[in-house]
Image (cartoon, grey):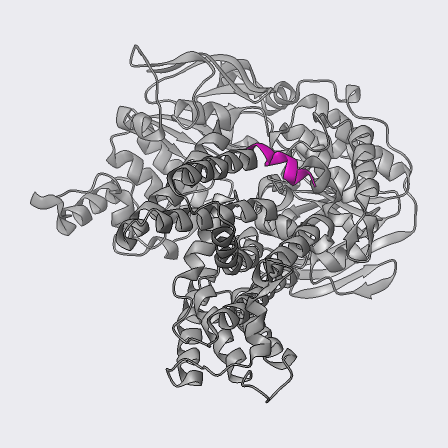
């Protein structure tokens, strides 16, 4: 895929930053390079990773999805509600969680395409609606008492955290899809120039519906994984998750104007953000300062990138 | 008063303005004449500070100046009124007129009363009967133009550059504009304007400068020129040199259109396109040519009327349908409706025909790359590789790439909307050759072009549109530029 080559230099840049920060952290802390810390980072990164891959699809079409965090909470709650021990096969709650996310995604997509409402507004509405539904469905309390067969999904297989496997699987499928499927190419075309794509015979509505639905489905998956990890469906979970996800995608070189971006870029963006979060924890930086530092790094990274790509 | 000294402008590798020197005098109407792409608008935009010249200077009141922005030029007293007017639709007439020079009191609060008075005063000077509190979006094009002129006057502009001000106006609106221009003249303003309308020039202009292919051919007082002389100077080159010979069209109708209507753009359009035929849609800007083509390609379907392809009635509701029916189009709006700038040349070329290089939903990269490479060669597209982003190519090469995209679907009916706009003469000749070759292969071609020599030399038949109606259908071999212009001119 040539879009990969085009961004190679850029990717190289982030990779160097990731390695430099990693080097710095392994010198200043004893714990960074420990196995337990790295698996912990992997676990933490996975949920943001799944969300970031999903929202990459939407951002590529020049849209945006602000409802990620709220939909994570809603999917977690619906999943947990059907996950009480001995009630259903483990596939049922998983399916319910995924379906919840996909339904939110389809709704976003329909409102954006058929309704002609700006993605920012549609998903802002979805953000509060989904949060409200999560509180209604759970009665405002965490849905606990989940069957171990589901919460085991947060565990390991052969020492590898299952959430990480989910993230890796999702990333691989998304990468293959965007670089080898017609629909993948159409996503770039629609984001690059919607009117030209329509004039070339592409159904812009279908492409966008697909992007929002995929994003919703993956958000549902993130909700299920989070519920499994925390062994509860938390109606207040996932607050501001969309911001970390979008930040990761943009750091990875995806243009908010659409049409430019790659899955590998997104993965690196996710890793960088995860590394920063972990590093600030390990260095016991107060969470107040963490917020400031993270914000500065995100804007700085994107600013550097744009400056570089302009020259 | 205003003088261009050896001004040159390049767009990438293409020189659109060869060093041009010309001067403009107070109280004089100076017309810039030339075919599309001759460099008239570019020259104006350089003078108005929209473009920076790559060479040469602007002399203003005896001093060499350089305008970094339209604002600089405006401050100096040079205003430009664009072909596409740029008002702020949700502000009032008065607010638009005083935009940027709002009368303010202490604390920077706008003094509404003075603002209105100033607007009324300027409008009265132009004898314009316009309510200053009306919203801009409720005005007609002609009224908007008056507001733009008032805006220029309000800034004490001594030079007003007008790019095709009459293109979208009705006859009595044109008469009003002419009165305005004469009034500006008597105030000592230098008016520079462009038009495609011959009669106008001789009614209005004091001096005429003729441009061709970015070069100034001559500047002469209007009374020393005749329309014939003017056209021959504008067209200049021997057409036979770049236009390949026509092949004989078939008799079998491929596309038939009857009663096609979409008010207010066009109504009751009837035309038949035969196998191997090149049918031109001629007409002035705003005559409805692009709109008719958009309907046939499904970009903006007609409200009523019948379209039949190969004798079968069809409904074309989207480009997807049109492509499935074997219709292809290269749009006039290369940036807006053609290119996907961030994608490579290969991806742009294969875009509309991607299903040809796919097994189910999967793209077969090798086949796609081979097809793209083949098209690059067949159309002599100059790109460093098929992977080069298309936005880096020159206009002519982009245009050839879009033609290549359209033809990859092997359409039987090809709509070409201004296929040679804004590209250099070499690329034009190549595109003419492709068009004739396609016709010889039996493709039916609907050609839209504002360049009359192009229409006359390429097409077999010409449908002339005038204000949304078919004014005439002519045999190209028995027509000339003047009769076409006469038919195209609003009644």
| Vertical placement of residue B156 versus A251, above or below | above
| Vertical placement of residue A130 versus A198, above or below | below
Q: Nearer the viewer, residue A99 or B51?
A: A99
**Which residue lies at the image location 45% right of the left edge and 41% below the top edge?**
B174
For residue B406, which quarter of the picture?
A: top right
Q: Nearer the viewer, residue B437 or B262?
A: B437
**Which residue lies at the image location 74% right of the left edge and 28% below the top edge?**
B381
Magenta-colored span: A1-9
Q: Is residue A234 left or right of residue B120?
A: right
Magenta span: helix, strand or loop, mainly?
Answer: helix
Q: x%, y% of residue B487?
A: 65, 42
For residue B228, which quarter of the picture?
A: top right
Q: x%, y% of residue A178?
A: 67, 51
Judge whether residue A6 is colored magenta.
Answer: yes
Q: Is residue A221 left or right of residue A293?
A: right
Q: x%, y% of residue B458?
A: 78, 33
Q: In the displayed image of the protein, which residue is found farthest to the bottom?
A: A87
Residue B88 visible in the current orientation: no
| Vertical placement of residue B331 versus B90, above or below | above
**Which residue lies at the image location 37% right of the left edge and 37% below the top edge?**
B179
Q: x%, y% of residue A170?
A: 63, 58
Residue B162 visible in the current orientation: yes
Judge whether residue B27 is colored magenta.
Answer: no
Q: In the displayed image of the protein, which residue is found farthest to the left?
A: B106
| Vertical placement of residue B125 versus B218, above or below | below
Q: Nearer the viewer, residue B450 or A255?
A: A255
Image quadrant containing the N terminus of chain B: top left
């Amino acid at each position: 895929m040539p879009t990969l080559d085009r961004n190679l230099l850029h990717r190289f840049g982030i990779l160097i930053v990731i390695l430099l920060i990693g080097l710095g952290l392994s010198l200043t802390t004893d714990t960074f390079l420990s196995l337990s810390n790295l698996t912990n980072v992997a676990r933490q990164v996975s949920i943001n990773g799944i969300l970031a891959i999903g929202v990459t699809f939407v951002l590529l079409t020049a849209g945006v999805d602000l409802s990620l965090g709220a939909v994570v909470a809603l999917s977690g709650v619906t999943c947990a509600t059907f996950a009480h021990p001995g009630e259903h096969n483990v596939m049922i709650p998983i399916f319910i969680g995924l379906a919840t996310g996909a339904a939110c995604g389809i709704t976003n997509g329909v409102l954006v395409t058929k309704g002609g409402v700006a993605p920012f507004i549609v998903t802002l509405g979805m953000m509060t609606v989904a949060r409200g539904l999560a509180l209604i469905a759970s009665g405002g309390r965490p849905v606990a008492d989940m069957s171990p067969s589901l919460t085991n999904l947060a565990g390991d297989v052969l020492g590898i955290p299952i959430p990480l496997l989910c993230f890796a699987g999702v990333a691989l499928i998304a990468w293959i899809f965007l670089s080898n499927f017609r629909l993948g190419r159409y996503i770039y075309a629609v984001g690059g120039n919607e009117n030209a794509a329509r004039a070339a015979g592409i159904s812009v509505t279908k492409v966008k519906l697909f992007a929002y639905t995929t994003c919703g489905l993956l958000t549902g998956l993130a909700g299920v994984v989070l519920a499994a990890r925390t062994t509860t469906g938390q109606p207040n979970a996932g607050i501001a998750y969309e911001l970390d996800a979008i930040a990761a995608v943009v750091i990875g070189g995806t243009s908010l104007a659409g049409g430019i971006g790659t899955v590998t870029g997104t993965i690196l963006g996710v890793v960088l953000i995860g590394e920063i979060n972990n590093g600030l924890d390990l260095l016991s930086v107060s969470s107040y300062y963490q917020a400031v530092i993270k914000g500065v790094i995100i804007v700085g990274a994107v600013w550097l990138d744009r400056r570089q790509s302009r020259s | 008063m205003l003088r261009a000294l050896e001004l040159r402008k390049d767009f990438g590798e293409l020189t659109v303005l060869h060093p041009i020197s010309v001067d403009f005098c107070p109280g004089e109407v100076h017309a810039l004449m030339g075919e599309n792409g001759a460099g008239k608008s570019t020259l104006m935009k350089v003078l108005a500070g929209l473009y920076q010249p790559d060479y040469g200077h602007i002399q203003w009141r005896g001093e060499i100046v350089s305008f970094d922005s339209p604002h600089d030029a405006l401050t100096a007293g040079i205003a430009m009124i664009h072909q596409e007017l740029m008002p702020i639709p949700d502000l009032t007439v008065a607010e638009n007129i005083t935009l940027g020079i709002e009368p303010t009191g202490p604390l920077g609060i706008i003094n509404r009363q003075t603002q209105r008075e100033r607007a009324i005063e300027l409008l009265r000077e132009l004898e314009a009967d316009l309510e200053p509190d009306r919203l801009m979006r409720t005005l007609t094009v002609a009224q908007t133009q008056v507001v733009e002129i008032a805006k220029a006057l309000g800034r004490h502009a001594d030079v007003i550059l007008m790019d095709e001000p009459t293109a979208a106006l009705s006859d009595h609106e044109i008469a009003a504009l002419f009165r305005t221009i004469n009034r500006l003249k008597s105030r000592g303003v230098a008016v520079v304007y462009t038009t495609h309308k011959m009669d106008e020039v001789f009614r209005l202009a004091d001096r005429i400068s003729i441009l061709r292919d970015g070069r100034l051919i001559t500047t002469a007082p209007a009374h020393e020129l005749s329309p014939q002389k003017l056209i021959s100077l504008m067209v200049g080159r021997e057409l036979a040199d770049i236009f390949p010979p026509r092949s004989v069209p078939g008799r079998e109708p491929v596309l038939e259109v009857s009663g096609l209507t979409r008010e207010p753009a066009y109504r009751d359009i009837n035309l038949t396109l035969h196998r191997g035929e090149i049918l031109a849609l001629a007409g002035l800007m705003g005559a409805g040519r692009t709109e008719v083509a958009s309907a046939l390609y499904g970009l903006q379907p007609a409200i009523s009327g019948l379209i039949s392809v190969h004798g079968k009635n069809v409904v074309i509701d989207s480009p997807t349908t049109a492509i499935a029916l074997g219709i292809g189009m290269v749009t006039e709006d290369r940036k807006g409706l053609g290119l996907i700038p961030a994608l490579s040349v290969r991806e742009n070329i294969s875009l509309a025909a991607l299903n040809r290089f796919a097994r189910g939903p999967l793209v077969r990269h090798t086949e796609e790359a081979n097809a793209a490479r083949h098209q690059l060669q067949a159309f002599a597209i100059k790109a460093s590789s098929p992977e080069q982003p298309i936005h880096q190519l020159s206009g002519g090469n982009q245009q050839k790439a879009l033609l290549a995209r359209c033809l990859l679907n092997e359409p039987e009916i090809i709509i070409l909307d201004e296929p040679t706009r804004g590209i250099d003469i070499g690329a034009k000749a190549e595109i003419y050759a492709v068009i004739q070759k396609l016709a010889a292969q039996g493709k039916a071609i609907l050609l839209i072009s504002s360049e009359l020599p192009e229409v006359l030399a390429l097409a077999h038949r010409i449908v002339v549109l005038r204000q949304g109606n078919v004014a005439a259908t002519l045999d190209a071999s028995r027509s000339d530029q003047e009769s076409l212009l006469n038919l195209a001119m609003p009644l």
